[in-house]
Amino acid sequence: MGSAAVLKDRKNQIFRKGNEPFDIDCNKDSLAGAVSQRACVFCGSRVVLYPIADALHLVHGPIGCAVYTWDIRGALSSGPELHRLSFSTDLQEMDVIFGGEPKLEKALYELIEKHEPKAAFVYSTCIVGIIGDDLEAVCKRVAEKTKIPILPVQSEGFKGNKREGYQAACNAMARLVGTGDIKGISKHSINILGDFNLAGEIWVIQEYFNKIGVEVVANITGDGRIEDIKRAHGAALNVVQCSGATMELADTMQERYDIPSIRVSYFGIEDMAEALYDVARHFDDSEMMRKAEILVRDELKTIMDKIGVYRESLTGKKAAIYVGGAFKAFSLVKAFRLLGMDVVLVGSQTGTKADYEELEAITDDGTIIVDDSNPLELAAFIKEKEVDLFVGGVKERPIAYKLGVAFCDHNHERKEMLAGFEGMLNFAEEVYSSVMSPVWNFVPRRKEVR
Ligand code: SF4
């Protein structure tokens, strides 16, 4: 790797497995000038709350903040689609000078009358933090008059890194939980936290849980509904996917309602099966475990032969992973192993020390592990490792294509369902079509990025 790609103050956030004792620096604010791939605090909260489909989402700030996150997840809904509209108070110079509270209050009344949402989330942006509008007071006033929950999301963009946005989103949802009726909820019930139903995943996962005899009380937040979140405290267990986004809410529910939580991933064969077994183990129910085993066996029967065909062509190809949360990276490492591919680079925007220790444990010697990376570093690593496929999100896609490397979208914008057993087959098909595409024969691969 060219030394110019790594800034001196970021050296400890990059680690090569096998070279030195593992001690990566992470979970801190991005270095100024490093052009981090991370989003702001506001964006962090927006991505978590966005899929709640029957709520009004109002961005209190300049129009650019709303545009930046408009339809950010494309999360699918089985009913209302109010979440897909992006509302903003469009703060202007005079609002900044004299305060934006009157404009916010007026916007809330107007939008609530027009769209009749079940609740409203009001997001604070950088400028609102600077001018000091009292979101809490405005939301309280409007809630009293409209009789629906109006929830301030304290997500001023500058106040930390993306993880703090997750926290702000969880704080807002925590105010809803505990306000609904929990009569009639089964003792074998769960909330699904941390799946955002980008391409229908939550419907597949719900079906698996229903088949093994588990009731899903609330989806938090994919295909989410306000009434379900209000009664989420009636569930017996929180099943949390993704390392950071909704863990804070699970912790709050543990404290307030004594609801335990387990962490799972629905991506890849091993992790999906383990998620079902973990839930059955938690309820200590042999019939549930038996149903889970049958489900896994039947699902594997339909996909393994097809995956084997892709594996033949993909064996020995090299993959690079750069994703938001490190938990997703664990599953991706295992999924690539199933496809016979070698993971040579893996990193995340928001991984914690414990996350990176686990990544270090499951990767091969020589793998580069990186925290809060930037385009120059990623491009240098991809060239050095002669990567065949890069997995990431919208900000990583141009890096791959400029280098003439195949790309697989595993983030907000994807339209391919990648969860569960069926999702693993979709992933294998997508990886195969991308890596083996003849188009890569026509690009000046691994030449300098201009
Ligand atoms: S909240 Fe601040 S950092 Fe985030 S998009 Fe708006 S202005 Fe930019």
Image (cartoon, rainbow, N blue to C red):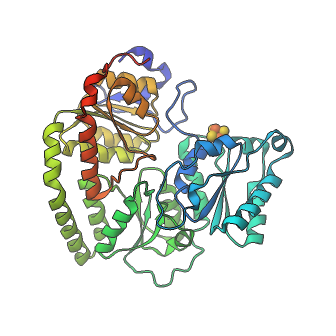
**Of residues 10 and 166, the one drawn nearer to the viewer in this rendering:** 166
Q: Describe residue 313's horizontal placement relative to residue 263 as left or right.
A: left
Q: Does residue 24 appear in this view? A: no
Asked where in the image residue 108 lies, by quadrant, the reply is bottom right
Q: How many labels does the image show?
A: 0
| Image x and y of residue 29, in percent | 55, 35
| Image x and y of residue 342, in percent | 22, 35
The relative height of residue 387 versus residue 179 in the rendered view (above or below) is above
Residue with the most extreme right position: 98
**Of residues 220 and 51, the one drawn nearer to the viewer in this rendering:** 51
**Of residues 70 and 229, the one drawn nearer to the viewer in this rendering:** 70
Q: Which residue is drawn at 68% across and 45% down?
A: 125
Q: Which residue is drawn at 73% across and 46% down?
A: 90
Q: Which residue is drawn at 60% across and 63% down?
A: 55
Q: Does residue 292 appear in this view? A: yes
Asked where in the image residue 385 lies, by quadrant, the reply is top left
| Image x and y of residue 46, in percent | 57, 50
Q: In which quarter of the image is ligand 1?
A: top right
Q: Describe residue 419's horizontal placement relative to residue 11 as left or right.
A: left
Q: Describe residue 134's horizontal placement relative to residue 54 as left or right.
A: right
Q: Which residue is drawn at 28% across and 51% down?
A: 426
Residue with the most extreme bottom position: 184
Quadrant location of the C terminus in the rendered image: top left
The relative height of residue 257 versus residue 334 in the rendered view (above or below) is below
| Image x and y of residue 39, in percent | 54, 39
The relative height of residue 119 versus residue 410 in the rendered view (above or below) is below
Quadrant location of the N terminus in the rendered image: top left
